[in-house]
Amino acid sequence: MTATANNKTRTNVYLDTEMKKKAQEIFKQYGMGLSDAFNIFLAQAVMEQGIPFQIKIPNNETAQVIKEAREGKNMTKVSLDELKKEVGA
């Protein structure tokens, strides 16, 4: 699906400021801007006839682990070599 300047429309979207900055840095690595990323998302949503990825609500145990990780609790530093030994690589 190719878009020309004649079939584009301007839309205002309210975004979380920090999330927007982080996303822009990621998209920049792909050589695209926020508009390009939104257009890709919308194209995929149309093709999939829905949100193009699974959205899950974590169970209580997972939510607690996520909360603790964000707070830096129960975290252990592990080297790449240690991980390789653990998985037998």
Image (tube, rainbow, N blue to C red):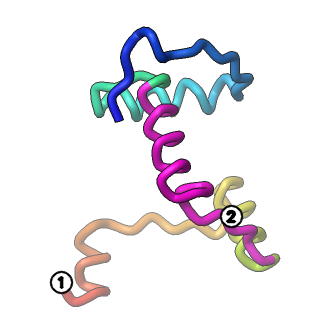
> Percent from the top left, x then y, of residue 1?
35, 36
In depth, the one of 40 and 60 nearer the eye is 40
Residue sitting at 70 percent across and 70 percent down?
65
Quick check: is 50 in the magenta stretch? yes
Q: Amino acid at mark 1?
A: Ala
Q: Can you identify the residue that label 1 sits on?
A: 89
Point out the tag, 1 or 2, that comes first from the N-terminus: 2
Residue sitting at 41 percent across and 22 percent down?
33
Residue sitting at 18 percent across and 84 percent down?
89
The answer to whether residue 84 is above or below residue 13 is below
> Percent from the top left, x then y, of residue 88?
22, 89
Quick check: is 38 in the magenta stretch? yes
Left or right: where 32 falls relative to 61: left
Marker disc for residue 47:
none
Marker disc for residue 66:
2
Q: Farthest residue toward the left?
A: 89
Left or right: where 18 falls relative to 82: right
Q: Secondary structure at mark 1?
A: loop
Q: Which residues are magenta?
A: 36-59
Left or right: where 80 falls relative to 6: left
